[in-house]
Structures are given as C-alpha cells and as structure tokens.
Image (cartoon, rainbow, N blue to C red):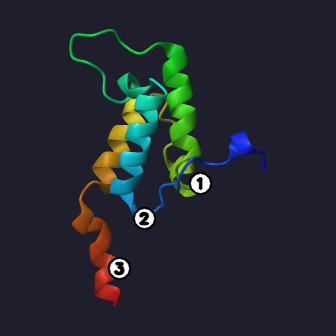
Amino acid sequence: MTESSRPEFEILDNRGKEYHQWVSDVTNTFIGKRLSTTIFPPPNGPLASDEAKAQALMFLRHHIHPTLKKQYLKREDPKDLWDVLKQRFNNVHDVLIPELTAR
C-alpha cells in the first residue's frame, strides 16, 4: 500500500465505534485541507466547488468501513454522506447499548 493510499487516521467502524473521535479527526483534517465548507456549508457564504466536493467525498469514503461504503455508495454529496452517518451514529447510547448489554 502506498503512503498516499493509507488512511490518515482510523476508519469509521461499521458499528460506529469511536464515531465522535472520527468526526473530530475528519473536521480537523477538512479545516487543514480547506474542505470544511463541503460538510459545513456557510449560510450566506460561497458554496464549495465541485472539485472540493469530489475530493471531500473521496476522503470520507476512504475513511469509512467497506460495509458503510457499500451501503452509502449512492450518496454523491459529501454533506449528504456526512449527515447520514451523523444520523446513524451520533447517539452514543444507541451505538454502545448492544455492546454493553452483551457484557
């Protein structure tokens, strides 16, 4: 695997484990790469370019579990993918309850 194809941080697990850490990593990386407007569009500011959206979408897909990638393959906008992952994994209790009850 080449250096550029390695994830920059842990990928998002298909159960959403460590989702909040993943969000923090993506957010900070997008700020550094000037892609934050692709997932946090400003209310009255300029919209992200198509090139920035494509780059952000590739980055997000590269940092999620293959199962999630397949489930959300038709999501072609990074904001849409970001929102659907947030809806699915943002509630820590929903993600951790099955794991905690199994113990």
Seen at 49% across and 44% down, the residue is: 72
The residue carrying pointer 3 sits among few (fewer than 14), some (14 to 19) or many (20 or more) residues within 10 Å by Cα, namely few
Q: Position of residue 68 (x, y in %)?
A: 51, 52
In the figure, is residue 93 to the left or right of 4?
A: left
Task: Tell me, for residue 15, which label it has, or none.
Answer: 2
Q: Is residue 47 visible?
A: yes
**Sequence order check, earlier mark of 1 and 3:** 1
In the figure, is residue 48 to the left or right of 68?
A: left
**Sequence order check, earlier mark of 2 and 3:** 2
Residue at numbered disc 1: 66
Q: Are marks 2 and 3 in contact (CB under 8 Å)?
A: yes
**In the rendered image, which quarter is residue 3 located in?**
top right
Residue at numbered disc 3: 99
Seen at 56% across and 49% down, the residue is: 70
The residue carrying pointer 2 sits among few (fewer than 14), some (14 to 19) or many (20 or more) residues within 10 Å by Cα, namely some
Circle 2 sits in a helix, a strand or a loop, which is it? loop
